[in-house]
Image (cartoon, grey):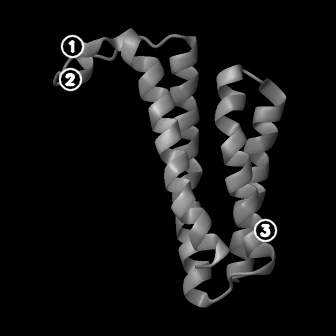
Amino acid sequence: MNLELCLLAWSVVLLALHIAAQSGLAAPIKGAAWNVGPRDEGRPPLGKYAGRAQRALDNFKETYPAFIALAVVLSLTGKTDGNGALGAELWFGVRIVYLPLYLAGVPYLRTAAYGVSLVGLVMMFLRVL
């Protein structure tokens, strides 16, 4: 399996970690009845860390579809080396550190990590061309 598809497979673990962090931090705030119920009423307000986990998950979901598409296209076209692979590694690597940075409330480094993830996606896209 090429690097891009390997990272794509591992990215599912990253998604699961984001979901686990968000749900684990929000569940005590929302309560069991809300979590298992139909959720017809509005959402209870989230605390500081549960809110950060939700925003980190939302941010992950913003770039994740692009990563999936680019990893698949690189694999299907056989362009699984060079800057495309480096871009995939960049995206994946900074997405690993993004969640803890966001949960810790680190302002500038978190934003830089997001920017580097976008650079990784651009590198992958340019390799597709």
Residue 52, placed above or below residue 11? above
Tag 2's secondary structure? helix
* Mark 2 neighbour density, 10 Å: few (under 14) some (14–19) many (20 or more): few
Amino acid type shown at disc 3: Leu
- In the rendered image, residue 42, in percent from the top left (x then y), is placed at 28, 16
Quadrant, the C terminus:
bottom right
Residue 117, placed above or below residue 47? below
Q: Measure the C-alpha gap from mark 1 to mark 3.
A: 45 Å
Residue shown at the point (77%, 24%) measured from the top left? 106
Question: In the figure, residue 40 lies in which quadrant?
Answer: top left
Residue shown at the point (17%, 21%) measured from the top left? 37
* Mark 3 neighbour density, 10 Å: few (under 14) some (14–19) many (20 or more): some
- In the rendered image, residue 87, in percent from the top left (x then y), is placed at 75, 65
Residue assigned mark 1:
33
Residue assigned mark 2:
36
Amino acid type shown at disc 1: Ala
Amino acid type shown at disc 2: Val
Closer to the camera in the image, 89 or 108: 89
Residue assigned mark 3:
86
Question: In the figure, residue 34 lies in which quadrant?
Answer: top left
Q: Is residue 34 left or right of residue 15?
A: left
Residue shown at the point (55%, 47%) measured from the top left? 14
- In the rendered image, residue 85, in percent from the top left (x then y), is placed at 73, 72
Q: Measure the C-alpha gap from mark 1 to mark 2.
A: 6 Å
